[in-house]
Image (cartoon, grey):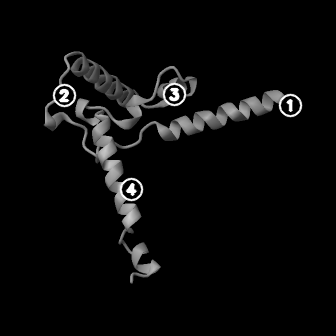
Amino acid sequence: MASVGSRAAGKLSLGQRLFSAFQDWYIYAAGYRQIGLRREDLLSDDDPDVVEALKRIPDDELNMRNFRVKRAIDATMKQRLLPQELWTKPSEDVTYLDIVIEQVKKERMERELFDKQ
């Protein structure tokens, strides 16, 4: 019987392994990596918080996001996946926008609270 300490030392429980396997399968089934996108590239530009966050990220990151989106649209219109060497690898699917969006939301909520007073 494994103790709690051994799990904390690096072993995953059965539930954690199953969740991780399901998560990996779901990401693959979603298909956004096969057309070269990152998870945060899927966020809608209709959300004002996302629009403000996009204004705050560095220009090179914004240009890369726009390139990935245009390339994905092109692949989708042609009904083709990108070659496997162009798929987004799990190590490349890192956050670049979530932190900025959270900051924008906090600022907006603070402004709304200040306006109420």
Asked if residue 113 is positioned above or below residue 4 in the image, the reply reads above
The disc placed on residue 50 is: 3
Q: Secondary structure at mark 2?
A: loop
Q: CA distance from mark 3 to mark 4?
A: 29 Å
Mark 2: amino acid: Leu
Mark 3: amino acid: Val
Q: Residue at x 29, y 38 (%)?
A: 29
The disc placed on residue 81 is: 2
Q: CA distance from mark 4 to mark 1?
A: 45 Å
Mark found first going from the N terminus, 3 or 2: 3
Circle 1 packing at 10 Å, graded few (<14), some (14-19), many (20+), is few
Q: Which mark is in front, 4 or 2?
A: 4
| Residue ID for mark 4 | 19
Contact (CB < 8 A) between labels 1 and 2? Answer: no
Q: Secondary structure at mark 3?
A: helix
| Residue ID for mark 1 | 117
Mark found first going from the N terminus, 4 or 2: 4
Residue 104 occupies quadrant: top right
As drawn, is 8 to the left or to the right of 101?
left
